[in-house]
Amino acid sequence: MENIVIGFNPVIALLQSNIKIEEVLISINIDKSKNRSLLDILDKKSKNIKVSYLKKEELDKIAGTNNNQGIVAKIKTQINYREINEFKESNTLLILDHIQDPQNLGAIIRSANLFKVDAVVIPEKRACPITSTVIKASSGAIFFTPIVKINSILSTIKNLKEWGFWIYTADMSGEDVRKINFDGKTALIIGSEDGVSQKVIENSDFLVKIPTAGNIDSLNASVASGILLYNVFINKNHF
């Protein structure tokens, strides 16, 4: 993972996490009235965090983009990927079948955090790594949501079943998600707009779909994730 965090909300989340921060870089042109909450938090932690003010062009160069909202943080430690066996007793896991777009991945992690997912699981190959773009798109949710990296989704499904999980996979041939009762330990699998692999479908316990009525046949992966995770959340919490 890259060692920089870009943008207002991601840096706020970083400051509230346990991740060690090397330095916070702020544009000399930052609007202090609009960023008061961020600056207040920095002020409280100023004894432990180095804060530097730079010209906008210098900050843009470090960030690698001018879309940085005038703030960049450097972190001392990387976000470590976790092991799947750490989550044997979890309530809800989200498995992503080869999501490769960083904006999608970040948005999915944000939804996962909001809807009490215990960990987001991604495969080693053909999947987006954790980058500064992913962190920004997650609005910093990645600092509070464990990320598990696995070698094989099929092997992971087998392990999860042995640990008592039910496997629910998003597929257009599935049952209306509103009619599903997400009992017990739940692992939800979501793929890209092309869907999940046939092998994953064959090894799932249930297929679920989001009913739609438009002229196109699929939702963006992050949108679909948000809708499905919301349904799992309200079902498990009896809203």
Image (spheres, rainbow, N blue to C red):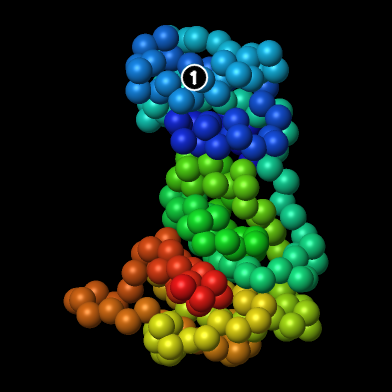
**SS class of the residue under badge 1?**
helix
Q: Nearer the viewer, residue 60 or 34?
A: 34
Q: Position of residue 81 (x, y in %)?
A: 72, 51
Q: Position of residue 52 (x, y in %)?
A: 55, 11
Residue underneath mark 1: 39
Q: Nearer the viewer, residue 56 or 9?
A: 9
Name the residue rendered at 45%, 31% in the picture: 7
Q: Is residue 165 above or below residue 96?
A: below
Residue closest to the far front: 239
Name the residue rendered at 73%, 46% in the picture: 80
Name the residue rendered at 35%, 18% in the picture: 33
Whether residue 189 appears in this view of the structure is no
The quarter of the picture where residue 68 lies is top left
Q: Amino acid at mark 1?
A: Leu
The quarter of the picture where residue 236 lies is bottom right
Name the residue rendered at 78%, 79% in the picture: 163
